[in-house]
Image (cartoon, grey):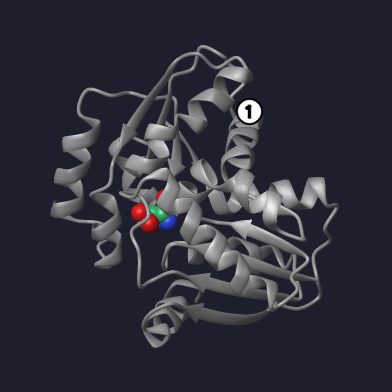
Amino acid sequence: MRAAVFDSGVGGLTVVKSLVEHRLFDEIVYFGDTARVPYGIKDKNTIIRYSLEALEFFKNFEPDILIAACNSVSAHAIEELRSNAPFPVVGVIEPGVMALEQKIENKDAQILIIGTNATISSARYEKELQKRGYHNTISKATPLFVPIVEEGIFEGEILEATMRHYFDGLHPDAVILGCTHFPLIANAISRYFNHKATLIHSGEAIAEHLIKSLSLKSRSKEPGLKFFASENPEKLKKIASAWLS
Ligand code: DGL
């Protein structure tokens, strides 16, 4: 079984890492639109256009499924991808909310959703949470975390100051890491909230969702990996070998 994984850049490798660990596919074809990242500051129509262009690229590989690892794509272009793809398309938002539902029973729990401006302005997570009865949500665009992670900063003063800037006064019961990059700073975020908040990681959520919805079984060996990027694929491959190790 072959999965195609799409992201605006390198961040979707956090989702690939979960898919590799769970050995759900024989092959994973990854495309990061590194020439046009970030998507999180772009408007809906641009995100849809870029996503449909990526879809054309993936069609050449005849994947069994397309996984939109990017939250900004999942928030704005999932319907368009689904109606134009000859294979199933899954995004990260519903699986993330389903994972939260499994971990947080209390519907009064305070849920903090963090993501790019595009993801937060779509209010997609909030709507999905509200459908399931969670009414105590706070959404916060935290775009500065994206370049910080891309700089390879996963702890330390700059990250601490940025967390204080965004999180001051907040005491959530759960945090939805609504951006591909945020799992890489999950430990720091958890520490900031004194390990009292449950963190939801898109990659893990999507792996669990695929296991359940497609009844996928773990393969005996790790998948073959193919990496493509619209700019500087060598850099993406280097980051992949560092993050996936
Ligand atoms: N991959 C994007 C997301 O998960 C983050 C980077 C970007 O803004 O493109 O929303």
Relative placement, left or right, of 142 versus 57 is left
Q: Residue 97: image x %, image y %?
A: 59, 33
Q: Ligand 1 is found in which quarter of the picture?
A: bottom left
Q: Which quadrant of the view contains residue 168? A: top left
Q: Is residue 53 visible in this depiction of the protein?
A: yes
Q: Which quadrant of the view contains residue 55? A: bottom right
Residue at the bottom extreme, as displayed: 234
Residue at 34% in and 50% down = 42
The residue nearer to you, when weighing 85 against 155, is: 85
**Image position of 136 with respect to 86: above or below:** above
The residue nearer to you, when weighing 83 against 69, is: 83
Which quadrant of the figure contains the N terminus? bottom right
| Residue at the spot of label 1 | 101
Q: Residue 125: image x %, image y %?
A: 51, 31
* Disc 1 element: helix
Q: Is mark 1 within 8 Å of ligand 1?
A: no
**Image position of 102 with respect to 2: above or below:** above
**Image position of 132 with respect to 88: above or below:** above
Q: Residues within 10 Å of mark 1 (few under 14, many from 20)?
A: some
Circle 1: residue type: Glu
Q: Is residue 179 visible in this depiction of the protein?
A: no
Residue at 24% in and 58% down = 148
Residue at 55% in and 67% down = 54
